Amino acid sequence: MTTPAPGAPVFDPGAAHPEFASVRAAAQAGDWPALRQHFAGRTRTDELVMLAVEVAGVEGVELFLTKVAEQEESSTLPEFLLAARCLELAWDARTSKLAKHVSREQFARMREHLCNGEQLLIDVTALEPEHTAAWTYRIKNGVGLEVGQAEARRRYDRVAATDPHSYRAQKSYLNQLYPKWGGSWEAVFAFVRERAAAAPDGAINATLLADAHFERHVWLEDAERRQYWQRPDVVAELHAAAQRSLLHPAFRRDYGWVTAHSLFALAFCLAGRHDLAAPHFRALGDLADPFGWSQLGGSAAEAFTKHRATALRKG
């Protein structure tokens, strides 16, 4: 039987997780009972954070959530979701431009939203000290508020005490460790290697290594970038990480699996090791995350399609 040719990449996270569309629809409709049901019984940090991200991306949802928060006294969920929306509004206000191109007024609006979100999260974690998803958002919020390395670590440790293998908390804390936020490359790689080694076989956490190596190459000059991906130690570390995590028999397609496979495929393509990228492309099919693919030239869709074809021929 002939295997159908791959199609165009699908960058919508909801294609891998149909419940995301239902969550967004409930938020758009202002249907609190339906939205609350999506979160009912969920206790895993990463699930709660990923669903909150979907709610936070709905334009105008803050008006609905503010009303619900005023009426709903028996649950911290409305405040948590409203805080997630505040973070979204903060980065929308700042935009993705370099700091020198962001106006003072934009920075002021960003900080206002972050402070509003921070107060909501303080209230949530005061009532529920082990609300690991709220602590994860406090890590994310703290990056924008520039709370510093010690406070960021305190927030991460509050998550790790209950959920030591939360990928979303680790990724949020990793952002704080990058030099652009006051950290260092030594701290970055020490952390990601430690958490990848500590994670159970088949866990997604080793994706932190791919994330860190990609971020490191972004800050190099063009010639240095090519040399970086040609380093045998970099390729060997990523290959070993993939074998222990995404390509391990114990791996399960939990939230974030598409981004994880897409990031490993990207890293191996940058390294010119399409043979090592092939298993990740096969796992993805037509699903993908657009992050980083434009580094290979053209649009994300064009780069993904081109390199997937090369990888599937070679691997």
Image (cartoon, rainbow, N blue to C red):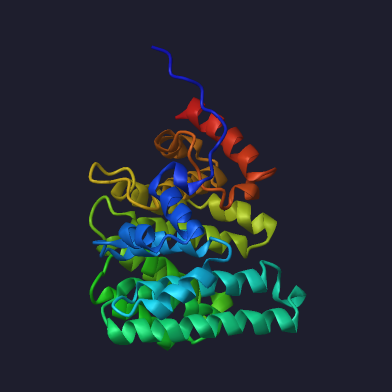
- Which residue is found at the position 27% from the left and 63% from the top? 44
Q: Position of residue 256 (x, y in %)?
A: 40, 53
Q: Which of the image's four quarters has the C terminus?
A: top left
Q: Position of residue 150 (x, y in %)?
A: 41, 88
Q: Nearer the viewer, residue 277 or 153?
A: 153
- Which residue is found at the position 44% from the left and 56% from the top? 26
| Furthest-front residue in this view | 71
Q: Nearer the viewer, residue 74 or 95?
A: 74
Q: Position of residue 280 (x, y in %)?
A: 42, 39
Q: Position of residue 277 (x, y in %)?
A: 46, 39
- Which residue is found at the position 58% from the left and 52% from the top? 292
Up-down: is 244 above or below 188? above
Q: Which of the image's four quarters has the N terminus?
A: top left
User: In the image, is 135 to the left or to the right of 303?
Assistant: left
The number of numbered discs placed on residues in the rendered structure image is: 0
Q: Is residue 230 visible?
A: yes
